Amino acid sequence: MSRPPRKIVVTGPFGAGKTTFAATVTAGLAGGTLVTTETGVSDATAALKGSTTVAMDHTTVTVPAAPGAAWTEARVNLFGTPGQQRFAFVWELLAQNMDGYLVLVDASRPAGVTEAAGIVATFQRIAPTAPRLVAVSRWADPAGTRGRLAQLLGTSPSALVPCDPRDLAQCTAVLRVLLDGVHVLEDRRAGTTTTDGVPA
């Protein structure tokens, strides 16, 4: 019997690459069509990006498993959240019944890192047991700054993964790691394994 589609939420600050991530996997993986609710930006953030998501992005893709994985492929319903704080109420709505989530952050923007820390804390409150990864773009020195960045974001260093949201291979790899965590958590709840999942 096939498993139902996984619900994965992609969140992060304004301009972190959430819509780009969704567009990349939609174009590169088998699945459906990207639906987005982007609109023009009229406030000070227009200097960073000309449009923003005001409700959600949505796509459905099939993620092939990596060799040796405990699963073969996974159908994923991917939901991208708005990044601006004024749409925070949408975060809780989209987080309902999710299987796991990604927090995207642009490491080259200190303000974005600060905003991402608040989002990490919010989602940790909403879904404290959900598998999570923090996908970091424009990360100049992962080896040298992992501990400090994790501290700033309020998460474990092992939860940080480099990811350029324009790169299909990197986006797919991140989804695979997250889905590994989702499957491990399900097995733990079923009492079939004691292996830890993706650290949060």
Image (cartoon, rainbow, N blue to C red):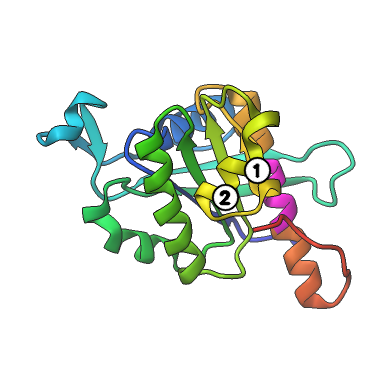
Residue name at image x 35 percent, y 39 percent: 35
Residue at screen point 74% across, 68% down? 186
Q: State how far apart marks 2 and 1 are (Cα).
A: 6 Å
Q: Measured along the vertical axis of the image, is residue 152 above or below residue 174?
A: below
Q: Is residue 15 magenta?
A: no
Q: Which residues are magenta?
A: 175-181
Amino acid at circle 1: Gly
Q: Amino acid at mark 2?
A: Gln
Question: What residue did someone put label 2 on?
Answer: 151
Contact, mark 2 vs mark 1 (Cβ under 8 Å):
yes
> Which of the numbered marks, if any, corresponds to residue 147?
1
Percent position of residue 116, x then y: 42, 47
Magenta-drawn stretch contains 177: yes
Number of marks in the rendered image: 2
Asked if residue 2 can be seen in this view, the reply is: no
Q: Nearer the viewer, residue 180 or 164?
A: 164
Residue at horizontal 70 percent and vertical 30 percent from the top: 143
Please identify the quadrant where the N terminus is shown: bottom right
Q: Nearer the viewer, residue 52 or 151?
A: 151
Residue 132 image point, x, y percent: 60, 55
Residue 134, position as x, y percentages in the image: 57, 45
Q: Quadrant of the C terminus?
A: bottom right
